C-alpha cells in the first residue's frame, strides 16, 4: 500500500506545484515554441521517472535502437495498464504526442500538460470527430512530432495479455497518409504492476520491446490492406516470447 500512497502524493504535489510552471512555459512558448516543447517533455519525463522509481518496477527495454533518430514515427502498442503511458513516455527521445480519450480533457492541470506535449484527444463515440483526430495526428507527424496510439481503443481487461482486442484499422492511416514508419511496442506484464491487484502497486518485472520499423508502402498488398491485423500479430508474437522469458 505504501507505493500507491507515495505515487498518489507525488502526482498531486507535482500537479499543484507545476501551476506557476504553466505561466513560465506559456511565456517561453510565445518566444520559442520548440524550447517550450522540449522543456515540457523533459519536465514530465522527470516526473514519470520518479513514479517509475516509486513503483519499484524492474524494467527491461529491448530494441530502442530500432527507433529512427531523424524522423517522426507512429508508435503502436498493446494496452493493459495505466502505467503503459508512464513507462513508455519516459523513454521518448523526441517530441511524442499520445492519443488519449477525450475524457482526459476534464482533468485539471493534467490536461494542460497533455496539451503542452501535443497529445490528441479522441472522441470514441463520434466517428467524424475521430477522423478529425486522426487527420490532426497525420499533420503532427508531418511536422516532425511522433505519435503514440493504443489501437485496441481502450485498456484490455482480458484474463490473458495474449488475448489482444482487435486493432482499429483507422489508427494506421496516420502512417499511411504521412509516410512515416510504424514502430510496434510490445508491453509485457504491466497490468501486474497495479490492475491485477488494485489498489496495490507491486514491484514486478515489465518488458518493453520496440520492433523494427514498418513502412506500409513496402509491405505486400494484402498486409497493407489489413495493417492492424499484421501489426497485432507481430506484437502478439513478441508478447509470447517475452512472457516466456519472465517465467
Image (cartoon, rainbow, N blue to C red):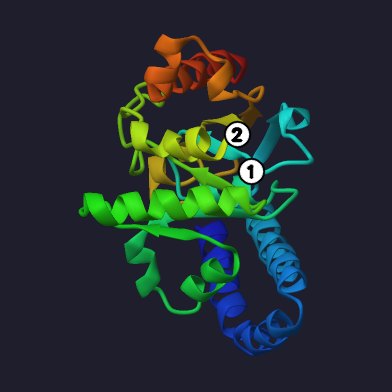
**The disc label shown at residue 57, or none:** 1
Q: Are marks 2 and 1 in contact (CB under 8 Å)?
A: yes
Q: Residue at x 59, y 70 (%)?
A: 116
Q: Secondary structure at mark 1?
A: loop
- Identify the image quadrant of residue 123: bottom left
Residue 177 drawn above or below residue 201: above
Q: Residue at x 60, y 36 (%)?
A: 180
Q: Which sits earlier in the primary sequence, circle 2 or circle 1?
A: 1
Which quadrant holds the C terminus?
Answer: top right
Crowding at label 1, few (<14), some or many (≥20) Cα neighbours within 10 Å?
A: some
**The disc label shown at residue 180, or none:** none
Q: Residue at x 70, y 46 (%)?
A: 91
Q: Which residue is mark 2?
A: 206
Q: Residue at x 69, y 84 (%)?
A: 30
Name the residue furthest left: 125
Q: Position of residue 87 (x, y in %)?
A: 61, 46
- Identify the image quadrant of residue 152: top left
Amino acid at each position: 500500500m505504501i507505493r500507491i500512497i507515495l505515487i498518489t502524493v507525488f502526482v498531486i504535489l507535482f500537479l499543484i506545484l507545476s501551476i506557476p510552471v504553466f505561466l513560465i512555459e506559456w511565456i517561453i512558448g510565445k518566444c520559442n515554441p520548440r524550447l517550450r516543447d522540449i522543456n515540457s517533455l523533459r519536465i514530465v519525463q522527470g516526473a514519470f521517472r520518479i513514479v517509475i522509481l516509486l513503483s519499484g518496477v524492474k524494467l527491461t527495454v529491448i530494441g530502442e535502437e530500432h527507433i529512427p533518430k531523424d524522423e517522426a514515427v507512429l508508435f503502436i502498442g498493446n494496452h493493459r495498464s495505466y502505467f503503459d503511458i508512464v513507462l513508455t513516455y519516459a523513454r521518448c527521445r523526441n517530441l511524442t504526442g499520445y492519443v488519449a480519450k477525450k475524457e482526459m480533457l476534464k482533468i485539471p492541470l493534467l490536461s494542460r500538460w497533455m496539451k503542452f506535449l501535443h497529445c490528441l484527444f479522441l472522441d470514441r463515440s463520434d466517428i467524424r470527430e475521430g477522423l478529425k483526430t486522426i487527420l490532426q495526428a497525420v499533420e503532427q507527424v508531418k511536422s516532425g512530432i511522433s505519435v503514440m496510439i493504443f489501437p485496441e481503443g481502450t485498456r484490455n481487461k482480458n484474463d490473458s495479455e495474449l488475448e489482444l482486442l482487435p486493432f482499429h484499422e483507422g489508427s494506421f492511416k496516420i502512417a499511411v497518409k504521412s509516410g512515416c514508419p510504424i514502430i510496434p511496442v510490445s508491453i509485457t506484464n504491466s497490468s501486474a504492476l497495479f490492475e491485477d491487484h488494485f489498489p496495490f502497486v507491486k514491484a514486478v518485472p515489465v518488458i518493453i520491446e520496440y520492433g523494427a520499423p514498418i513502412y506500409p508502402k513496402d509491405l505486400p498488398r494484402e498486409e497493407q490492406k489489413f495493417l492492424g491485423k499484421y501489426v497485432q500479430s507481430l506484437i502478439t508474437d513478441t508478447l509470447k516470447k517475452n512472457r516466456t522469458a519472465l517465467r
